[in-house]
Image (cartoon, coloured by chain):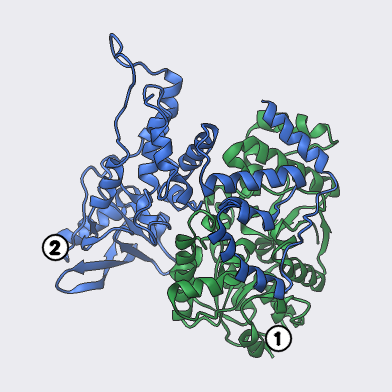
Amino acid sequence: MEVKFKIKRYNPVKGEYYDNHTVNVSPKDTVLNVLLMIRSGTDQSLGFRCSCKSAICGSCAMRINGRGRLACNTQIETVISENNEILVEPAGNQKVIRDLIVDLDMFWNKIKETTPYLQHMGPPPEREYLCSDEDMLHLSEVTECIMCGACVSDCTILEVDKKFMGPAALAKVYRFVFDPRDNIDDSRLSKVSEYGGIWDCTHCFKCIEACPKRVHPMERILSLRKIAMKRGITDNNGSRHSDAITKSVEHSGTLNELMVLPKSFGWWNIKELLSLIPGGIRMWQRNKMPSILHPKLAGVKNIKKIFKKFKSK
Amino acid sequence: MKYAFYPGCVAKGACPELKMSTETLMNKLDIELIELKDAACTGAGVISEHEQELADTLNARTFAMAEKIGAPLMNICSTCQGNMSRSNNRLKNDSSLLKRVNETLSEEGFNYSGNLSVKNLLWILVEDYGLDKLKEKVTNPLKGLKVAPFYGCYILRPTWDLGFKEYPARGHYLEKLIEVCGGEAVDYSGKDKCCGFPILTMNKKNSYAMTANHLQEAKSKDADCMVTPCPLCHLNLDANQPDVAKTVGTKIDLPVLHLPQLIGLALGISQYELGLDRNIIDTKNVLSAVS
């Protein structure tokens, strides 16, 4: 089949531009095979990273049709458009060095900031540090991460704030927080509960879609939120927000929108509370202000019973 | 056609115009809605941070109510759709979870079979009602109005939980509906990204930066307005737009319509019945395109 590859190129002299290559390929060919074909044939100047061709080394992450993927495990037939076109761009959120090659310094610096090694308190064991099969099986879902950065490429928070730790680094934190051999204290959880950590994730699911190894980084971030709250690390807006919504549903069956904002900011946070006033006036003027007397569902007693059952578990 | 109608919390709170315009549109299309008045919040993706099974139980309770009515469920919020789809899949695929949940629900006399169809209005209009039938109803075409679609994350991802295998075009339905209504869909990169609303209280700066990016990108592509099936996105894109504009130091003034408001206009429903006077950003440029 004939496929048109539209490739985003960059070099410091020419700047950004797009190249088009029409190539004859098999539907089962991978995008990486086609890039190698182009480089060995029509354009030897095309820059990209690759090594294992087996979705193990994580070198060839790039954006294919707008989504972070590994070029080596993306078959043509799974991404081709109705017009037989495929758009190939460098991974997002990182500085482009040349063509499809991005600077990975930001990625690795964020991983390094997580102290990505086991930290054990107390005397060392006589032999190796043991971990049960069950725990190891659970952790293996996260240790599958091959550090390709496809999740970082598509993270919608990193688009606006490079200080966000990002999905790969936070999944790495999960890997150590849930490892029974790593027992330092709650310092990992305290650190990720601050600005730039778990509460800055916006639930966009982009990292879950992009991850070629099904590490599900966003789910790991939500699990870190849960365990941080359970361990009492709750003096932050994210934790207050989560608590305000959950309690509202418990007590009325639905969301009390009027109370969620001040409860999340904290009643003593005068500056933020005052900042809500102009928006409140706009809502009131347009008859959009939720009622101060938040109505309860008729069957709220049954909802309370459901909550009670889970609390007693 | 009949649906068990789940309005969700926001359409009964800060976006009353969404519930109002939905009911008016469905009436115009002869679709019967039976509101699930005692249904709880889906969990908003937040209750699951505390206990996933609790959120699944609350959703199963709502599904059981719809099953009692004997109609598929319709919601009008991307976030509700995402939470409901994921709970429904877990309940369908995990018989021990379904059993435990039903034990809890039995105290209230409910039982959920695990087989309910749960669809957002967006999907219902395209898949159940049909674009050809809808086109026949268009009396006031949007005359080339340039409309930027904005989906909301929860109705797009993860694709494996949202039926994209069976309906691979679900990521393009807004564009199809805009065109059926006589408008022109604006293509821009922000349409499938996050509106920023979920982190509004955690990091307002980032939240507004995301919203500003999408609004400004749509404007740069000459959009006359934006349309969304998600009231939470609508709150950041419309209700918070004046504050968002201040952070970037420029006026944006891009009207943002709820999905039933846009379709309703093309079907000749009056602006008052669609609650357009409640949108924060003035919609007069949209109205002048239709009149």
Q: Chain of mark 1?
A: B
Q: Nearer the viewer, mark 2 or mark 1?
A: 1
Q: Disc 2 residue type? A: Gln
Q: In terms of image quadrants, where is residue B77?
A: bottom right
Residue A202 in the image, given as x and y percentages of width and height:
49, 53
Camera-side residue: B173 or B209?
B209
Relative to residue B106, is residue A226 drawn left or right? left
Q: Chain of mark 2?
A: A
Tag 2 secondary structure = loop
Q: In terms of image quadrants, where is residue A276?
A: bottom right
Tag 1 secondary structure = loop
Label 2 crowd bin: few (<14), some (14–19), many (20+), radius 10 Å: few
Q: Is residue B21 above or below residue B200?
A: below
Q: Which residue matches tag 2?
A: A44
Residue B262 in the image, given as x and y percentages of width and height:
66, 76
Q: Does the rendering let one see residue B187?
A: no
Residue A22 in the image, given as x and y percentages of width and height:
28, 68
Q: Colour of chain B?
A: green
Residue B60 in the image, given as x and y percentages of width and height:
73, 41
Name the residue located 29 percent from the left edge and 39 percent from the top edge: A56
Name the residue located 32 percent from the left edge and 39 percent from the top edge: A114
Q: Disc 1 residue type? A: Asn
Q: Which residue matches tag 1?
A: B140
Relative to residue B15, is residue A141 drawn left or right? left
Q: In terms of image quadrants, where is residue B87?
A: top right
Q: Does the rendering let one see residue B16?
A: yes
Q: Is residue B11 above or below residue A247?
A: below
Relative to residue B16, is residue A41 drawn left or right? left
Q: Which chain is blue?
A: A
